[in-house]
Image: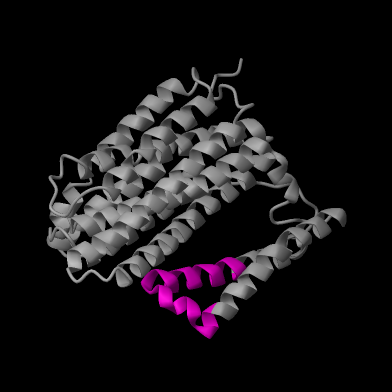
């Protein structure tokens, strides 16, 4: 059930967003999100257990000495700068030439390179480290992190460009509501995959699940890369929507169990936090890169017809997504070689 939450919520958000846009207004998507978050936060006050840590230090002293403030600041600033630059590139690839973006990108890369050296320095001194380098020594964990980065980059890209194709707004001319309804196969498949994964996870090796699901999802992007303007929805877009969530949903569930199996309880929360951050970062990177590629190809296509010029850029973006999905297959094939069956009940 936990594995179903993130992918299913992501897909339902797309569908509901389109429904709100054409009915009560797009602002209601944000209103509903605020209401839901408020209710969950309120319930958490009573439902989540309190954590009591035995320590002779006061909480103020623990705050000062038991948190890696330098590491946290370094990573936060680096990711903040990098995400800002990626957002600028997503809106227009030409903004990469701006001096401010070049400075921010360079600074972010320098900080990211310096981060593991600071982690090593902290560990040698016996001080708290935000993300100890030791965490990456586990092959299965590193593999699922790389895979989920590429996987969520691909998923975000294919959903974004399929939405543009069907609006599904810029090429097909459909309304937001009509576009959102065409994502229903995505939601239905997401629910089915999570149920099936729950039944198979204790019987099938994690590498088999990850590789097979990656191969299935790989089919989605070539379908959209070869679709023609005005083509029947049921011939290609339907199947692309139907197949695209298979690998993300399987990988999300498998990865959480791999983390639980690979680390002791005191490390699992850190590993889970890093895993989720890697996935979210993959979303941003995937969208920025594919958007920049599509915009550049469209601008330099020399095609006068607007729909055909847009589709040329979209096709290249879909082939880029296909390359990313292919990389996921390779990563999980080699990275999870020693991964057996997880999720079995321990006696």
- Asked if residue 175 lies left or right of residue 128, the reply is left
- For the residue pair 55 and 170, the one nearer the viewer reads as 170
Q: Position of residue 285 (x, y in %)?
A: 48, 60
Tell me: residue 23, above or below residue 338: below
**In this view, which residue lies farthest toward the bottom?**
99
Query: Residue 203, position in %: x, y?
Result: 49, 17
Q: Position of residue 90 (x, y in %)?
A: 40, 68
Q: Is residue 288 above or below residue 54?
A: below
Would residue 229 be found to the left or right of residue 314 on screen?
left
Quadrant where the N terminus sits is top left
Which span of residues is magenta-colored? 77-101
Asked if residue 216 lies left or right of residue 263, the reply is: left
Q: Residue at x 26, y 47 (%)?
A: 226
Residue 1 appears in view: no
Q: Is residue 201 above or below residue 296?
A: above
The answer, for residue 110, to whether it is visible in the render is yes
Front in this rendered view, residue 175 or 332: 332
Give the residue drawn at x 49%, y 54%: 282
Dominant SS in magenta: helix
Residue at the location (40% across, 67% down)? Answer: 292
Q: Is residue 134 above or below residue 188?
A: below
Outermost residue, front side: 302
Quadrant (top left, top right, bottom left, bottom right) of the C terminus: top right
What residue is shown at x 33% (from left), y 45% (from top)? 221
Q: Quadrant of residue 314?
A: bottom left
x%, y% of residue 144? 56, 40
Counting every numbered tag in the picture gives 0
- Asked if residue 100 is among those painted magenta in the image, a careful observer would answer yes
């Amino acid at each position: 059930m936990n594995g179903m939450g993130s992918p299913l919520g992501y897909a339902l958000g797309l569908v509901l967003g389109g429904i709100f846009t054409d009915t009560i207004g797009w602002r209601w998507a944000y209103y509903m999100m605020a209401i839901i978050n408020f209710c969950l936060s309120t319930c958490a006050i009573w439902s989540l257990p309190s954590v009591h840590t035995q320590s002779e230090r006061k909480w103020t002293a623990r705050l000062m000495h038991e948190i890696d403030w330098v590491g946290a600041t370094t990573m936060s600033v680096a990711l903040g700068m990098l995400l800002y630059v990626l957002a600028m590139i997503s809106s227009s690839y030409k903004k990469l030439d701006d001096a401010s973006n070049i400075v921010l990108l360079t600074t972010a890369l320098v900080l990211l390179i310096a981060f593991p050296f600071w982690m090593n320095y902290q560990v040698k001194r016996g001080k708290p480290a935000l993300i100890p380098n030791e965490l990456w020594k586990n092959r299965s964990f590193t593999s699922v992190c790389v895979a989920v980065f590429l996987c969520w980059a691909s998923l975000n890209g294919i959903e974004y460009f399929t939405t543009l194709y069907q609006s599904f707004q810029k090429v097909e001319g459909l309304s937001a509501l009509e576009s959102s309804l065409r994502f229903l196969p995505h939601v239905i498949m997401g629910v089915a995959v999570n149920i099936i994964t729950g039944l198979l996870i204790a019987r099938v090796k994690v590498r088999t699940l990850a590789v097979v699901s990656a191969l299935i999802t790989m089919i989605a992007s070539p379908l959209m890369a070869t679709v023609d303007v005005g083509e029947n929805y049921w011939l290609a877009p339907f199947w692309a929507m139907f197949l695209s969530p298979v690998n993300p949903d399987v990988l999300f569930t498998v990865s959480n169990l791999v983390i639980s199996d690979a680390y002791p309880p005191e490390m699992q929360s850190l590993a889970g936090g890093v895993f989720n951050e890697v996935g979210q970062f993959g979303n941003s990177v995937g969208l920025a890169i594919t958007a920049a590629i599509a915009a550049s190809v469209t601008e330099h296509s020399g095609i006068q017809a607007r729909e055909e010029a847009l589709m040329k850029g979209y096709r290249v973006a879909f082939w880029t997504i296909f390359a990313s999905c292919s990389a996921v297959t390779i990563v999980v094939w080699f990275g999870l070689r020693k991964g057996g069956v997880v999720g079995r009940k321990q006696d």
